[in-house]
C-alpha cells in the first residue's frame, strides 16, 4: 500500500484565516486615538489658557480610560491563566500576574475615578457635601495601592525568568541594557536616600507612606532587572506573538520608571511644566502596555486553536 500516494490523493482543505478581533491591535489603536485627543486638549489649553480643556479630558475621558483598560487587563490576565494547566509554571505565573492586575485596577479606580468630582463618579452623588481633602486622601491611598502591584508582578515575572533560564533562552545583557539599569536604579537609590533623610529628621513615628515607598521602590528595581532580562530573551527569540507577550511587560515597567522620574523632576522644578506634561500621558501608555501582555497571550492561543482546526 502506497501511503504517500493515499495522502496526496486526499482533498486539500482550504486554510481559513481567523476573523477574530485582533485584541492587541485594538488596544494600540484606541490608545493612540485617546492620546491624540489628549494632545489636542493640551494644545487648546496652551492657546486659550483655559484649564477646562485639561480637566474635561483627564477627569472624564482619562478616568474612563483607566477604569476600562485596568479592568480589561484583569479580565485578559484571568483568561490567559486559563490557557495553562494547573501544574504548569506559566499557570502559576499568570495567577500572580492576574492578582497584580487586580490590585493595580483597584488603585486606578480609587486614584483616578472615585476621587474626581465628576458627574461620572457615583461618589460625587452619594457624598454630600463633596470634601476635596477626603478626595485627595482617597487619591493618595489609591496611588499607593496601585504601586503595590509591583511586588506581585515581580514575583510573577520572576517565575517566567527562572523558566527561561532553565530552558536556556536568557541571553547576555549588552551595554544599552546596563545603561538603562543604571539610570533607573540610580534614581531609585536617590529616592531611597531622600526618604531616609526625611524619616530620620522627623519627630513623629515612621509614616505608612514612607514605609510603602521603601517597599515598592526596591520592587520596581527588581522589576526592571527582570524586564531587561525578558527583553533580551525575546529579542533573541524573534518577534512573534509569544515574544510580544513578555515584551509588553518590559515596556510597561520602563515607561513606569520614566514617568516616575518625570514626576520627580517636575515636582522639584528641574524641568518646566511643558516637559512634565509629557509624563501625564505616559501613564496611559503604561496602562495600555500592561493590557497588551495578556492580550498577546490570548491572541497566540486563538491562532493556535485556529491552526489546529484547519
Image (spheres, rainbow, N blue to C red):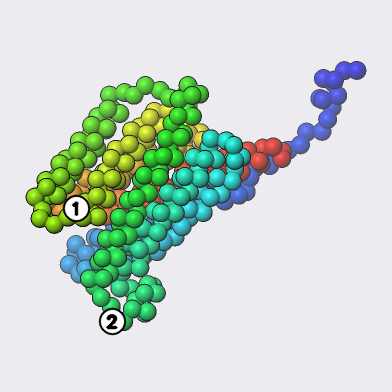
Residue located beneath label 2 in the image: 129
Nearest to the observer: residue 78 or residue 49: 78
- Give me the C-alpha separation between circle 1 and circle 2: 32 Å
Q: Identify the residue at horizontal 82%, vertical 25% (top origin).
A: 7
Q: Identify the residue at horizontal 15%, vertical 41% (top origin).
A: 193
Which residue is outermost to the bottom?
128
x and y percent of residue 175 in the render? 27, 24
For label 2, the SS is loop
In the picture, residue 261 is in which quadrant? top left
Q: Is residue 135 found left or right of 93 in the rendered image?
A: left
Q: Is residue 34 visible?
A: yes
Q: Earlier in the sequence, mark 1 or mark 2?
A: 2
x and y percent of residue 4 in the render? 82, 20
x and y percent of residue 55 in the render? 27, 68
For label 1, the SS is loop
Q: In this view, does 75 lie above or below 15?
A: below
Q: Is residue 69 visible?
A: no
Nearest to the observer: residue 121 or residue 200: 200
- How many dots with numbers? 2
Residue located beneath label 1 in the image: 206
x and y percent of residue 97 in the render? 46, 45
- In front: mark 1 or mark 2? 1
Q: Is residue 45 found left or right of 157 in the rendered image?
A: left
Nearest to the observer: residue 241 or residue 291: 291
Amino acid at each position: 500500500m502506497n501511503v504517500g500516494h493515499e495522502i496526496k490523493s486526499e482533498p486539500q482543505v482550504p486554510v481559513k484565516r481567523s476573523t477574530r478581533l485582533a485584541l492587541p491591535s485594538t488596544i494600540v489603536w484606541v490608545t493612540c486615538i485617546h492620546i491624540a485627543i489628549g494632545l489636542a486638549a493640551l494644545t487648546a489649553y496652551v492657546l486659550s489658557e483655559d484649564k477646562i480643556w485639561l480637566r474635561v479630558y483627564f477627569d472624564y475621558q482619562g478616568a474612563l480610560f483607566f477604569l476600562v483598560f485596568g479592568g480589561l487587563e484583569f479580565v485578559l490576565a484571568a483568561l490567559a491563566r486559563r490557557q495553562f494547566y494547573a501544574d504548569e509554571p506559566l499557570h502559576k505565573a499568570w495567577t500572580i500576574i492576574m492578582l497584580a492586575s487586580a490590585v493595580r485596577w483597584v488603585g486606578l479606580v480609587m486614584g483616578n475615578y472615585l476621587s474626581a468630582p465628576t458627574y461620572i463618579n457615583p461618589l460625587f452623588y452619594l457624598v454630600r457635601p463633596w470634601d476635596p481633602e477626603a478626595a485627595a486622601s482617597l487619591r493618595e491611598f489609591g496611588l499607593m495601592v496601585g504601586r503595590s502591584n509591583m511586588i506581585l508582578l515581580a514575583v510573577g515575572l520572576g517565575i517566567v525568568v527562572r523558566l527561561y533560564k532553565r530552558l536556556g533562552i536568557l541571553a547576555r545583557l549588552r551595554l544599552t541594557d546596563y545603561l538603562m539599569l543604571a539610570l533607573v536604579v540610580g534614581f531609585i537609590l536617590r529616592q531611597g536616600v531622600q526618604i531616609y533623610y526625611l524619616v530620620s529628621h522627623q519627630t513623629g513615628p515612621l509614616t505608612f507612606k514612607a514605609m510603602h515607598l521603601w517597599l515598592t521602590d526596591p520592587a520596581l528595581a527588581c522589576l526592571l532587572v527582570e524586564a531587561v532580562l525578558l527583553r533580551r530573551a525575546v529579542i533573541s527569540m524573534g518577534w512573534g506573538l509569544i515574544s510580544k507577550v513578555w515584551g509588553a511587560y518590559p515596556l510597561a515597567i520602563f515607561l513606569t520608571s520614566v514617568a516616575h522620574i518625570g514626576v520627580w523632576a517636575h515636582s522639584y522644578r528641574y524641568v518646566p511644566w511643558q516637559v512634565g506634561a509629557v509624563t501625564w500621558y505616559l501613564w496611559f501608555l503604561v496602562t495600555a502596555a500592561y493590557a497588551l501582555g495578556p492580550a498577546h497571550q490570548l491572541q497566540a492561543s486563538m491562532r493556535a486553536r485556529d491552526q489546529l482546526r484547519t
